[in-house]
Image (tube, rainbow, N blue to C red):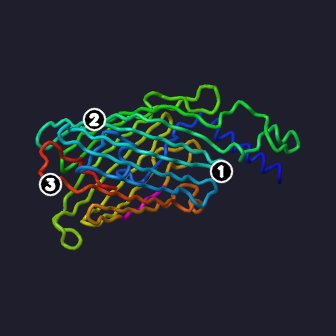
Amino acid sequence: MVVMNKIHRLFLLFVLVFGGITARAQDPQFGHFYSNSMLYNPAFTGNVDLGRFALSYRNQWPGIPGNFVSYAASYEHYFDEASSGVGIQFVSDRAGSGGMTTNSANAMYSYQIRINRQLALLTGIKAGMHSRFYDFSKFTFADQIARDNAPESTVEEFRERINYPNFGTGLVFYHQEKYWFGLSLDHINQPQNGFQDETSQLDVRTALQAGWNFPLNKGYGGHSNSKITVAALYKAQRKWDQLDLGMYYRTDPYMVGIWYRGLPFKSNESSAANVDAMMLLMGFKVDRIAFAYSYDLTLSALAGNTGGSHEISIILEYPKPKRRRKRFFRVPCPKF
C-alpha cells in the first residue's frame, strides 16, 4: 500500500511537470466573465463610468483532493479626454495536491474608436509577467523508491519555479444599447512555461465573446429598465476548446443568470459527451457596490464527486462624473 501511494504521487508529479509539454489549456477559469472581462479580452479595459475595483474568488471541485482555487483582483479606469482605458490585474491560481501555483500581474490598455452615434470599436492590448511553481517536497521520485524510500531525491533537472512574459490583444465591436462582439488572442508570444529545459510552448488562446440585450416593458416589481441578456464565450487553445452559453435577467437592483459550459456535439478524447457544468448565478447592487455568487453543478462523468464549484465577486465603482459624458459609451454587457 505504501509503495502504491508513492507510485501514485510519482504519477501526479509526471502530470504536473510534463503536463506543460502536452496540456494546452492551463489558464484559470472564472464563471463571472464580466467581473474579469480584462482577463479574457483587454479591449474591455475601462468599460466603466470612471473607475472600478473587482475581486473574485473561485473554488472548483472542493470535493476532490487537489481542487482548483483561483483569485483575481483588478482596477480599471477610463480617461474620457483620451478615449482610453487603463487597468491592472493580479491573478493567482492553485491546482493539484502538489500546490501547482501560477501567479500573474498584467497591465492593460484600450482605445475607443467612435463609428457613429451608436456604434463603436474598442481595441486593447495587455502585457504581463507570469510565475509558476510547485511544492517539490510533496512528491516522491522514482530514485527514492529505488533507494528504499530515501527521504530526499537526487533528481536535479527539474526547476521548481519559472517566470515568463505574456502578451495579448483584442477588440470589441458594439452598439451602445443592444449588442457586442469581441475577439481576443492571448499568449501571442507563445512563451516557454515548462519545468525542464526541453521546449514547452504555451499555445495561443483564441476567445470570442458576444451578447445581445432584449429590453422588457415591465420587469419584476414594475421596473421599466428590466432586460434579458443572452451571451456566449468561446475559447480555443490548440486541440482544446470550450463554449459557455448564458442568459441573464436584470431588473435593478437584482440580477439572476444561468450558464451552460460544454460542447455536447463534440466528443472528447475518451469519446464521452463533452459536457462540463451548469452555472446558477445571482447578484445585487447597492449604490456603487455589487455582489454576485454562483454555483456550478457538475454534469460530466465526475458528477456526484466534485462538490460543484463556488464563485464570489465583489465590485466597487466610483460615482458617476458630474458632467454628461459625450465621447464614451460603454459596452452594454452585464456587470457580472
The residues bearing labels 3 and 2 have C-alpha atoms spaced at a distance of 27 Å
Q: In x, y percent, where is residue 100?
A: 60, 45
Q: In x, y percent, where is residue 215?
A: 19, 59
In the displayed structure image, the side of residue 149 where residue 231 appears, left or right = left
Q: Which residue is denoted by mark 1 in the rendering?
A: 97
**Residue type highlighted by circle 3:** Lys
> What is the span of residues highlighted in magenta in the rendered image?
277-282
Pick the quarter of the image with the N terminus.
bottom right
**Residue type highlighted by circle 2:** Thr
Residue sitting nearer the eye, 280 or 10: 10
Residue sitting nearer the eye, 234 or 80: 80
Q: Which label number is shown at residue 250?
A: none
Q: Quadrant of residue 242?
A: top left
Residue 35 lies in the magenta stretch = no
Q: Which label number is shown at residue 123?
A: 2
Instruction: Give the mark toward the camera: 3 or 1.
Output: 3
